[in-house]
Image (tube, rainbow, N blue to C red):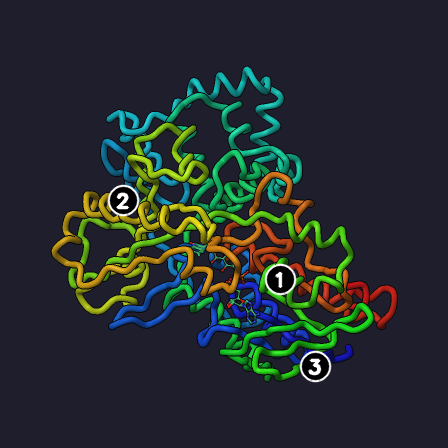
Amino acid sequence: MSRHRIVVIGSGPGGSAIAALMAHAGHDVTLVERNAFPGGKCSSLPRDGFVVDTGVHMFGRGPVGPFGTISRILGEGPTWLASTPSFTLSLPGGRLEMASSILHPISILNFMKGHARGWQRMGWTSTASRALGALGPRGLFSLARRFNHPRYPLYAELQDVSVRDFMTTLSGSEDFLRTFHAQAMLTMVLPWHRASMGEFAYILASTMQASRLCYPCGGSGAVPASFLRALRRKRGIIRLDCEVSRIETKEGRVRGVTSSKGEFLPADVVISSAGLRRTVELAGRDAFPRDYLEVADGLRDSEAFVAVKFFLERKVSSMRTPCLLHMPGLSPHAMFDYLEDGGVPSDLFLFVTAPGNWDPSLVPPGGDCLIVGVPAPSSLGRQDQARSLLDLAQELARGIFPEIDKAATAVEMVLTGDISRLSGRAGGDCIGAAQEVGQSGSRRPTPATPIGGLFLVGADAGGRGIGTEMAADSALRLYFRLKDGFLRPRGAGDPCDRG
Ligand SMILES: Cc1cc2nc3c(=O)[nH]c(=O)nc-3n(C[C@H](O)[C@H](O)[C@H](O)COP(=O)(O)OP(=O)(O)OC[C@H]3O[C@@H](n4cnc5c(N)ncnc54)[C@H](O)[C@@H]3O)c2cc1C
């Protein structure tokens, strides 16, 4: 196998994974990262005795998903933590503690409790009869069978159907619809009329099959850190504080990259996790055909989660699970209208995490940290609205956890501008290219670009699943593709030549 010089741009879950995998395959890899620390939106930074995640707070499948596959190939990976019960549903009437699988006895008992007390009526009977009416017995049986199929056939079939259109065909129950609308927002950071049902079906089925919610020991940053350890072990080079300002090409092939300090790093292959649009800018628009530029310009990003972080000198005893989902007392049809109309509703969907409940070493002895996330528009032009949403989120959190008022030593807001500075992207989007109707499944941009030797990895290219797992899945797919390509002699059959 010939050795190639590979430059990887970015050290988030996508970049760190592909860099380690390509070094493992025997290539000379240099990873360049514009931030002074590794991990991108999946990093954790020390702060006055706390270790604080910059973005990510929950990993769907942990060792069972693409992170596990990558770790097994590399022989290196994070230690995964899981807890049961794993999250709390905070409903207008009361709270229910749930296990990661809805079939776990704890979840079933609490679903029954919520129903009996009238806190959450999922309308299973009316939903079943509506679904039966819409699909017929054979259609319903086939849907249930294919939903649980290990190869997820619904993924392709439903890629162009929105979550809203699919769910409202099945059910008229407000609580049922609110639950799934909130789930789509939590996992794809999109309102349900944009979110692709194919992608959502994959996320629901794969997390149900994995039956766990995970978090890495040491914080989110432990995931890219473990891949970077594997990269170093294979003599890969990591350059922090090194921003790529230009991807150099000649006659339709990549030649290397130039840093913002003017240093040229030669390469046979460049793999970019800077996002499709930014990668096109870095290589120069002239280098791409017009139809490719149209795709790049038309790509829509996901929305954002902004957050308020409470640093506390005492434990929040009422937060008994690592995560809490606060369901707003609003119609499922209107609960995220504010993302488009620019307003601030009377109640919000909140995703609250207490990382110290996963891993106590992340908070000082006796202390705690609560991170309250709220969906917000990703556009940097709408930060005033995001700030107002965070003011309300803060007020709601103080109502849910009255003890934080006395225990908070510091309160910090994370806005979309902070996220954009972290990722280097133009907006504060959480995920990257939105998993929405028209750009998910087979319509998602592929890792290959029209420039020979230039590839994309991470949030914008290939891959499927929830945030970090989609970025890792994208790296895994590219690894298998390039690995096979490199093993063939150079020429027409080599994907590096074809781009
Ligand atoms: C607030 C928030 C909460 C989230 N919560 C979750 C969660 O709970 N679970 C989950 O699975 N996902 C979550 N996500 C999403 C997850 O963080 C992303 O899906 C994931 O990090 C994408 O990985 P990536 O490698 O594609 O990109 P990134 O993590 O964005 O990494 C890209 C890297 O490239 C670097 N870069 C860009 N341009 C250049 C350049 N020119 N030169 C050098 N380096 C460059 C950037 O600095 C960055 O480090 C969350 C995101 C946010 C913002």
Residue visible at 73% across and 78% down in the picture? 4
Decide: few, some or many residues near mark 2? Use Cα within 10 Å; few <14, some 14-19, many ≥20: some
Asked whether 223 or 277 is in front, the reply is 277
Q: Name which quarter of the figure residue 46 lies in.
A: bottom left
Give the number of the disc on residue 488.
none
The kind of residue tagged 2 is Leu
From the top left corner, tell me how far across and down residue 26 is, in percent.
68, 78
User: Residue 16 at what x, y percent from top left?
Assistant: 55, 69
Instruction: Please say if 236 is above or below 141.
Output: below
Considering only order in the chain, which callout, 2 or 3, is on the residue closer to the N terminus? 3
x 59%, y 74%: residue: 244
Whether pointer 1 and pointer 3 mark residues with C-beta atoms closer than 8 Å, the reply is no
Mark 3: give few (<14), some (14-19) or many (20+) Cα within 10 Å.
Answer: some
Is label 3 in a helix, a strand or a loop?
A: strand
Mark 1 or 2, closer to the camera: 2
The quadrant of the picture occupied by the C terminus is bottom right
The residue tagged 1 is 457
| Residue placed most toward the observer, 494 or 415 | 415
Mark 1 / mark 3, whichever is N-terminal: 3
Q: Residue at x 56, y 36 (%)?
A: 197
Q: Is residue 413 above or below residue 250?
A: above
Q: Nearer the viewer, mark 1 or mark 3?
A: 3
Give, as a three-letter code, the residue at label 3.
Answer: Pro
Please state which amino acid type lies under the numbered disc 1: Val
Q: Name the disc covering residue 266, or none.
A: 3
Q: Going from the N terminus, do you reach mark 1 or mark 2 first?
A: 2
Of 425 and 236, the residue lying toward us: 425
Q: Which residue is mark 2?
A: 392
- Secondary structure under tag 1 reads loop
Quarter holding residue 285: bottom right
Residue 223: percent from left, percent from top: 47, 66
Q: Is mark 2 within 8 Å of ligand 1?
A: no
